[in-house]
Amino acid sequence: MKHLFTMLLFCSLLLCSSFLELSIAYEDSSFCCVQSSDRCSKAGVVDRCVKYCKICCQECKCVPSGTYGNKHECPCYRDKVNNKGKPKCP
């Protein structure tokens, strides 16, 4: 019984520390800069792509992987639309 409690305590501490690291990464603006630059590296108008990607990253706290697609990885990013109903996030 002691070993089970110890193991559960250890796992919960490990899990909490990983969430803490993620939350710190999302609050750091450099996270959004790097992710947006990677995402927009092959865009036709890179500066505009990076601008909107950073806005979406700061609001959604995530950026899909790759340079195109994969928006299922970040539903908030995927569902943002502009005033014309078109996708806001690149």
Image (cartoon, rainbow, N blue to C red):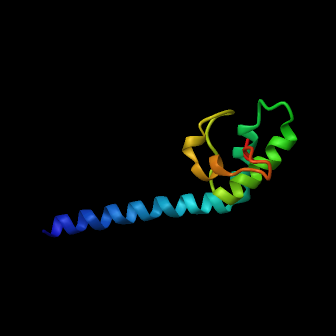
Residue 90 to residue 55: above or below = above
Classify the position of the N terminus by image quarter: bottom left
Quadrant in which residue 16 is drawn: bottom left
Of residue 80 and residue 66, the one placed in the foreground of this image is: 80
Please report the residue visible at 57 percent of the width from the left and 62 percent of the height from the top: 23
Residue 63 to residue 17: above or below = above
Please report the residue visible at 40 percent of the width from the left and 60 percent of the height from the top: 15
Measured as percent of width and height from the top left, residue 44 is found at 84, 30
Q: Is residue 18 left or right of residue 22?
A: left
Measured as percent of width and height from the top left, residue 57 is found at 69, 53
Please report the residue visible at 63 percent of the width from the left and 34 percent of the height from the top: 69
Of residue 78 and residue 47, the one placed in the foreground of this image is: 78
Measured as percent of width and height from the top left, residue 43 is found at 80, 32
Residue 26 to residue 73: above or below = below
Please report the residue visible at 75 percent of the width from the left and 44 percent of the height from the top: 86
Measured as percent of width and height from the top left, residue 38 is found at 72, 38
Residue 22 to residue 66: above or below = below
Q: Is residue 24 left or right of residue 38?
A: left
Of residue 82 and residue 47, the one placed in the foreground of this image is: 82
Classify the position of the C terminus by image quarter: top right
